[in-house]
Amino acid sequence: MKKLVFLWIVCLVSIGILAVSAGAQEKWAMGCSGSGSGPYMWGATIAKLINRHSDLIQISPQASAGYNENVALVAAGDIAVGQQSGVGLIAALKGEAPFKGRPHPRLRYLFTFLPVPFHVVTRAAANISTPAELKGKKMNISLPAQITRTFNEAFLKAAGLSTSDVKVFEMATGQTFQGLQDGVIDATGNIYSEGHGGLLELMTNTQIKILDLPEDVRKKFLALVPATIPYTLKAGSYKGHDQPIQTIAALNVLFCRDDLDEKLVYHFTKTYWDNLAELNQDPGFKYLQLNQAVAESVAVPLHPGSARYLKEKGLIK
């Protein structure tokens, strides 16, 4: 009888330990952007991966007003991690526009979760083969509040043009494909994942050309926009583009506050990158590589948890 009681107690204790263990799983919200947006879909992919392979953290993508609101949410401790562009994170840390006078010194860089190349897409019928030939054409440069607008203005400057040299259209990214198809615009500069599904779909009914940026334009472009890298779109990524296309890429990064638990940040970073092969099965992450995980140009202190993993992989000293 005593033995049965003892075994019953052991079972109860075991069940209790398991319950506590399950209950101890940390729940992190990840600030993305509007529901259905590219960043929100990226967040959903990341959450699915982490939640499948982690028993310590549960991630949920959180819709937000965009990358700049993510800074406010993380800084206030309302969410654990957020998405930003590399250039946006630098500005937030230092209190530069659009965070003028509101520095956030406690923000920390986790890692670059996805470099996203800048595409200059033109209608084939517009006969645009070089950046210089955009002069006088109808070009979408995006909405004033979007980071894409910063890229377009820098691109034009790097190409020796200005907004007065093109017929400016200010369209959200989601409107550009229809605009190209209908001939409303001749060209658009946007930041898409390589092999972007919407662009591939557009190519089924509209002949388009993605511009290769000359070396001098790329160098000037990189100098004008912080936290960017040279990028080569692989041959065959898009229909009719059998040669590599040279451009630059924005760095989409994850960030947190300096007081986020170091062990959990290490676990999160390790879980993400150790399952890269699975992540590559998602079209948006198809070309992601481990050597893209950190960039010196993102001049923001790394969180110690992510730094530990990156050191183990030899990516930083």
Image (cartoon, grey):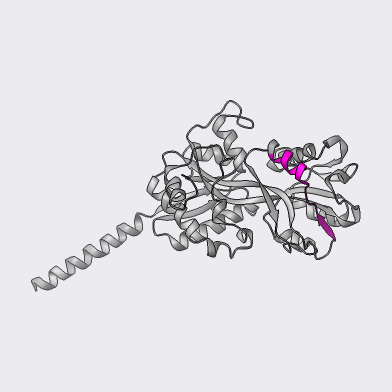
Q: Residue at x 78, y 45 (%)?
A: 171
Residue at the spot 58% in from the left edge and 36% down from the top edge: 90
Q: Nearer the viewer, residue 60 or 193?
A: 193
Out of 240 and 102, give the one closest to the viewer: 240
Residue 280 in the image: x percent, y percent?
A: 58, 62
- In which image quadrant can residue 178 be found? bottom right
At which x and y percent is residue 317? 46, 44
Figure check: 180 above or below 3: above
Total marks shown come to: 0
| Residue 210 lies in the magenta-colored region | yes
Q: Give whichever of 228, 137 is nearer the camera.
A: 228
> Is residue 309 or residue 113 the one in the foreground?
309
Question: Is 245 a magenta residue?
Answer: no
- Residue 226 is situated, as x and y percent measured from the top left of the image, at 64, 38
Magenta residues span 207-222
Image coordinates for residue 59, horizontal then vertical, percent: 48, 54
Does 210 appear above or below 87? Answer: below
Q: Residue at x 53, y 60 (%)?
A: 276
Above or below, comparing residue 57 to residue 161 in the picture? below
Q: Is residue 232 left or right of residue 140?
A: left
Question: In which quadrant of the rendered image does the N terminus lie?
Answer: bottom left
Q: Residue at x 38, y 55 (%)?
A: 25
Is residue 317 found left or right of 91 in the rendered image? left
